[in-house]
Amino acid sequence: MPTSKQKRQAAQRHLQRQLERRAELAKKRRQRNIVLAAALSVLVVLGAVFLITTLGGDDEATDPAASPTTSPPVDPTATTEATTAAPGACTFIAGDPAAPNVTDVGLPPTPAETTGTVELSVATNQGDMVFTLDRASAPCAVQSVEYLASQGFYDDSPCHRLVNQDAFGVLQCGDPSGTGTGGPGYAYAQEAPAGETPYAAGVIAMANSGSPNSTSSQFFIMFQDTDLPPEYSVVGTVTSGLEVVETVAAAGNDGSFEPSPGGGAPNLPITIKTMTPVS
């Protein structure tokens, strides 16, 4: 029969084993909680990434700023026909001239000037406007717009998209096909605008697809101060006739571009009849 001492020693060993088991269980619980917390963090990050992508991505997507549509994608490796010049000059990258909705007018020449202004007389079925383009703000974009205007590219082209939202009001033009996917068959790099509020009412900026080197012929006119990231080349302002755009904007849009990229065709259709450089 065990002595009292032996019973105490057995009880101590039993208690020790219980404490060790409890410690092991507590350790496992802590490890499990760490794994669960890590998994939850990953889910939170993935959820945030999804939200940011949804709000700012192409299709920038419910944010109508993110994807002003532009011409069909061009081949960034196609340099044999690209207009290139010295470092810092413009590179116009040619795409497939047989692609759908392309109006091929060749490539712009290298700009001879990177300062000064260009004035364009714009006649529409809703009234006339004057665009004053500033070469210093986006010399490659201004060179392209002036070239396209001189080639009659913009003539008889509808403004296909209107966005009427708080802090976001734009009329988008520059696609002769009126589909939002057309263009001249070339593209070039975005030129980030300077200034804290570059997209004020009356400003004209170039659309792009959200990818590098995707600026082409399409542009949008702000009819109210518009909140956009500084990723769209500012080419100039409407110096006369902004009320034409304001009248079109007041009639609203048909929502055909909702939910992404936002807006729709203007309820009051507007077509650029001619866009002519003023000598």
Image (cartoon, helix red, strand yellow):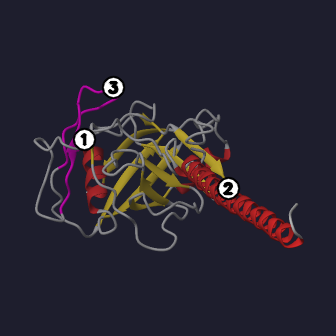
What kind of residue is marked 2?
Arg
Q: Earlier in the sequence, mark 2 or mark 3?
A: 2
Depicted 217 relative to depicted 231: above or below: above
Residue positioned most to the front: 1
> How many other residues sit within 10 Å of disc 1, few (<14), some (14-19) or many (≥20)?
some
x, y percent for residue 260: 58, 40
- The secondary element bearing badge 3 is classed as loop
Q: Which residue is mark 2?
A: 32
138 falls in the magenta region = no
x, y percent for residue 42: 59, 54
- Name the residue rendered at 50%, 50% in the picture: 66
Q: Earlier in the sequence, mark 1 or mark 3?
A: 3
Distance from the alpha carbon under mark 2 to that under mark 3: 56 Å
Q: Which residue is mark 1?
A: 151
The stretch of residues the image draws in magenta is 89-108
Distance from the alpha carbon under mark 2 to that under mark 1: 69 Å
Q: Which one is in front in this view, the residue at disc 1 or the one at disc 3?
A: 3
Q: Which residue is mark 3?
A: 100
Q: Is residue 1 left or right of residue 146?
A: right
* Quadrant of residue 152 within the rendered picture: top left
Quadrant location of the N terminus in the rendered image: bottom right
